[in-house]
Image: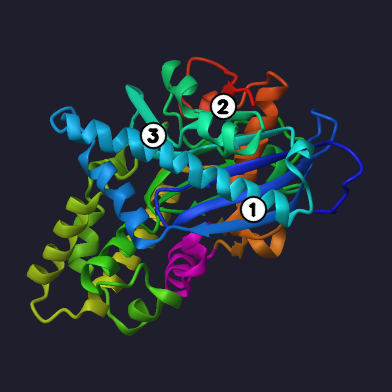
Amino acid sequence: MRDDRASGDVLVGLMSGTSADGISAAAVRFDASGEKPSATLLAYHEQPYVSAQRERLLRAIDGVSLASLAGASLSALSRLDFELGAWLADAALAVIGNAGLVPREVRAIASHGHTIWHEAPLATWQIGQSAVIAEKTGIDVISDFRVRDVAAGGQGAPLVAIADRLLFGADGAWRALQNIGGIGNVSVVPPRGVDAPVVAFDTGPGVAIIDGVVRTLVPGLAYDVDGTLAKRGTAIERVVAESLAEPYFASPPPKSTGRELFNRAYIARFVARCREAHAAATNEDIVATAVAFTARSIADAYRRFITAPVADVVISGGGARNPALVGALTAALAPLPVRMFDTVFFDGDAKEAVAFAFLGRLFLERRAGNVHGATGARGPRVLGKLTPA
């Protein structure tokens, strides 16, 4: 995408994903036309969480239930909401500086925040206080993108589908855009200019199980760097097959999931099943099993629910940086070609932050941001809430 700073609005997109590895911030310039949108990535910034920050986010997810919302829990969640807002603001200011801009040149910040509970279509909850972001940056903030779709009976996910369709489709061919964050999601988009429905849903775990297994078995290691552990292990087929029997995988779209299902208790059971199935299993074998399970769950979703003549699969997110997972997914999806988002567009780690910047742009234009046929909402809805600077 060309770097044209002469026209259009600049928005900053902020994303803290279910992998809980850090904040992604993208400064994006959108052209002046809303009919045929184009986006230019001006700068990208990753702000990793230190272990204490990650642990607080994961504990918040583990602890959110009606039974556990005691006073101390509410106090901790409220403080985390405000502190995360400050972390998000810092990431926004960093990417603005990286782009060679000053805050007054940014029309708005679009912040997804961090999901700590998602039980669509009943409720969804993202933290990362928008008022704190507005105070620290002096920029209008658009946040809470999921809630309107859920209020309209939808899954509130995946919300990147509209960006996938309008920004990242292919000429003359159907394309599957597979994000592999903590949770995996896919958008199957028609060729550019073709009026056909988008199919989009959460495929299941992305790196949530893999990273969780690594953190459980190798304290101090946040993830399997370069897939080294998995490549030294052998997957336990019995556990892979048993894990694929989870009812979520057979449930048809529209559907979404998160750490409410694939949480640390699930990960502990996964490790225990590996030990029971193979008493001599090494740590590497268990990580390899998590990789095989994740890749097979994605491929299984394609076979079950995607009927469009997909020409290629373009992958992005943290899982796309794991060679063991990419190799397993490529084998599981064969003969479909699997391509890296980086080779087609720009840094794939920035993709979801760019998508939320685009949702912010749609909000400013009072245009619908949900693909309601994919989320299951009752109709198109403008997504987001505005916190003025």
Q: In x, y percent, where is residue 246?
A: 23, 47
Quick one: 197 or 361, which is closer to the camera? Answer: 361
Q: In x, y percent, where is residue 385?
A: 55, 22
Q: Which residue is mark 3?
A: 255
Task: Answer above or below: position of 299 versus 357.
Answer: below
Report if residue 326 lies within the magenta region: yes
Q: Which residue is mark 2?
A: 370
Numbered label attached to residue 152 = none
User: Given this view, does label 3 or label 2 mark the residue nearer the observer?
Assistant: 2
Task: Note whether residue 348 is visible.
Answer: yes
Residue lying at 75% horizontally and 40% vertically, measured from the top left: 192
Numbered label attached to residue 94 = 1
Residue lying at 24% horizontally and 42% vertically, measured from the top left: 247
Task: Answer above or below: position of 46 versus 327.
Answer: above
Three-letter code for the amino acid on which mark 2 is drawn? Asn
For the record, the magenta segment spans 317-335
